[in-house]
Structures are given as structure tokens and as C-alpha cells.
Amino acid sequence: MRKSLSLQAEFAEEFGACVFDVTLDCEDGAPVGGELDHAQMVAEMALQSYRASQRRAPAKPARIAVRVHPVDHPAFEQDIEVLLGRAGAALSHVMIPKVETVAQVVRAAWTIDQIHGPSHDVAPMPLHALIESAAAVHRAFDIAAHPRIQSLSFGLMDFVSSHGGAISSGAMRFDPLNGSVSLDQFHHPLVVRAKLEIASACHAHGKVPSHCVVTEFGDPSAIGAAALQAKRFGYTRMWSIHPAQIRGIVTALAPSQQEVELAARVVGAGAREQWAPVAIDGHLHDRASYRYFWQLLERAHQTGCKLPGSIDQFFADSQPSPGETL
């Protein structure tokens, strides 16, 4: 956890933005019987790192989250009381694992609000949900629709193990050379279906789909290839299981420079024509493509990509964004 927080600060300095979140784990990371001590340590770590990021860049503080125990675990309420009671102001969101129903999201939100708000001066704490079973995948659209949900993540390992051996262990792995034969995580039909359902549920409700981990952290080339596959499945974020994977994920999920340059040309031309249709390189662009390319530029800005000078005006605090008018 300390290494990830340190790397987050290094990347923020390099890219000029906080380009990835760090989620401090109180579920699998806590030893049985030591949940309270672990939660207290995590709260202090989050608070210290957040305050340090505020000193470095007050306008762009670090994004630090916590993964608590499931809502039906005896330590869940204790996690919430310790983490949000001590470090709520430092947290960007709370990750809820093993989410099966909307009722669990409602319970999590209610419990958090008893500690953290909501009130007129404290915004409700966003929730991220881990979808880790076939039943949860079935309800993914309903879970994504809940207003407190900001993102859904796919929990590959638990999803595979929840099938009682019906899905082979090979589906937990990434096999870039032989995946279609070995039925790795990008080719096993039940896993592929789950990934597509979660991504589709998120996009249907304006939420962020976050792809599962790749366990092959010893192969630097594997993570970039896997992140590109995740991108093709409609995912805009991806979990790392080791700090060495982070740069490969950030690079693969960020828009390419060629995409950024085209987006800048299209948005710039649209702005000059008051968002009327324009032709660029023989292709017609109207408000639908303006929205698409504006969203691409937003992702580029958030991930520290270099933007053409002509487009910087749209990211100044005093300027309205095209997204507000399209």
C-alpha cells in the first residue's frame, strides 16, 4: 500500500495530474481477528498521504479509496466507523465488495451516511461495487442505476471460483498467445459474457466500468496487451495487482496522440461553426461526434496526455465546456 501511494505521488509529478486511484484494502488485506488494527492503520495512511498531496498540489489532491468488508461481514460497520470517522475527508470513494443486490448498496450508503453525512456541506460519499458472482452480474444494470454508485468493478477470481469448478482455472489467467484455445479470461464464454454485461450496465447509466486484475505481473508486456483487450471490451479503467503494472495500464487506456489530435481538430472546428455540422478529411461530424471527441479529450486531460494548444481554452476554469452545450 505504501509503495502504491508513493508511486501515485511520483506519477502525479510526472503527468501533472492524479492519473490513477489507490485503493487501500481492508477486506483481504486484514488478518482475521486484526480487522480493527488494520482499519486504524489504513485510516492513518490515507490521511497522511492525502494531506501530503494537498501540500504538493492543492488543486489536484490524490485520489485515495478504501475497500471495506462486505456489508454482511461482522467488521463492515467497524470499518466504516474507523475509516470514515477518522479519514473521511481524505477518501475519494468507498469500494464495497461482494455486492449481490441493490439492497446491499442501500444498506452501505445508509451506514456510511450515518458517519459521513450527507449534509449541506458534505457531499455523499461515492460508492464503487465489486461484481463477483453470476447473480450479481444478473443484477448489474439495477446496481449500476443506483445514484450512489460511481463505478462497477469485475471481480474475476471470485467470479470463477463461485462456479464450483464449472469454469476452469485457466479463465483466471491471461494467455496472449493461446487464449482462444486455453479459454483464458478474454475467451471463456461465461467470463466474456460477464465482462460485457458489466461494461454495458455501466455505460447505460453513465457509470465507470473497471476491468479486473491480470495476475501475470512478472511479464511487463502482458499488462499492456491485457489493458488493450479490456479497452476493446468497453472498459475505461483497470485494476492492477502490483505497482509494476500501473504504467502499462495508464498508457494503454489513455487515448493515443493521434486520437487526441483528431479530437482537437473536430472539436475546434465545431466550436468555430457554433456546433453546426462540419466536414473534416471527407467525414461529416455533428453533435454526436462532437460529444464523442470531447469525452476523448476529457480522458486525455485526466490521464495527463499532452493536448494541442488550440484546445487548452476548453479546460480553463473560466471557460464553459462544449459538453455543457451539446
Image (tube, grey):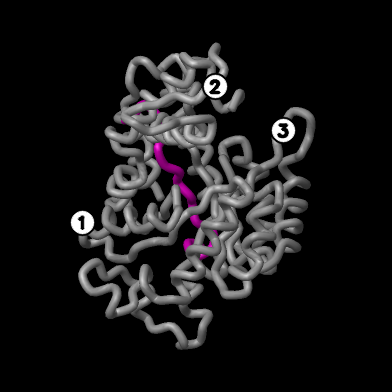
Q: Which residue is mark 3?
A: 122
Decide which of tag 1 and tag 3 comes sooner along the chain: 3
Spot occupied by residue 161 in the image (x, y as percentages of width and height):
48, 79
Give the crowd class for mark 3: few <14, some 14-19, many >=20 residues within 10 Å: few
Q: Amino acid at mark 2?
A: Ser
* Front position in the image: 277 or 3: 277
Spot occupied by residue 56 in the image (x, y as percentages of width and height):
41, 23
Q: Which residues are magenta?
A: 15-30
89 relative to 167, above or below: above
Can you tell which of label 1 and label 3 is closer to the viewer? 1
Q: Which residue is mark 1?
A: 221
Residue drawn at the location 48% of the way across and 54% of the way down: 210
Can you tell which of label 3 and label 2 is closer to the viewer? 2
Q: CA distance from mark 3 to mark 2?
A: 26 Å
Residue 321: mark: 2
Residue drawn at the location 50% of the way across and 22% of the way down: 59
Q: Amino acid at mark 3?
A: Val
Decide which of tag 3 and tag 2 comes sooner along the chain: 3
Decide which of tag 2 and tag 1 comes sooner along the chain: 1
Spot occupied by residue 122 in the image (x, y as percentages of width and height):
72, 33
User: For numbered disc 3, what is the local secondary structure?
Assistant: loop
246 relative to 153, above or below: above
Based on the displayed image, in which of its 4 quarters is residue 129 positioned?
bottom right
Res 36 visible: no
205 relative to 139, above or below: above
- Residue lying at the far bottom in this picture: please name it: 165
* Front position in the image: 136 or 46: 136
User: Does residue 234 show up magenta in the picture?
Assistant: no
Give the crowd class for mark 1: few <14, some 14-19, many >=20 residues within 10 Å: few
User: For numbered disc 1, what is the local secondary structure?
Assistant: helix
Spot occupied by residue 40 in the image (x, y as percentages of width and height):
57, 50
Cβ atoms at labels 3 and 2 below 8 Å apart: no
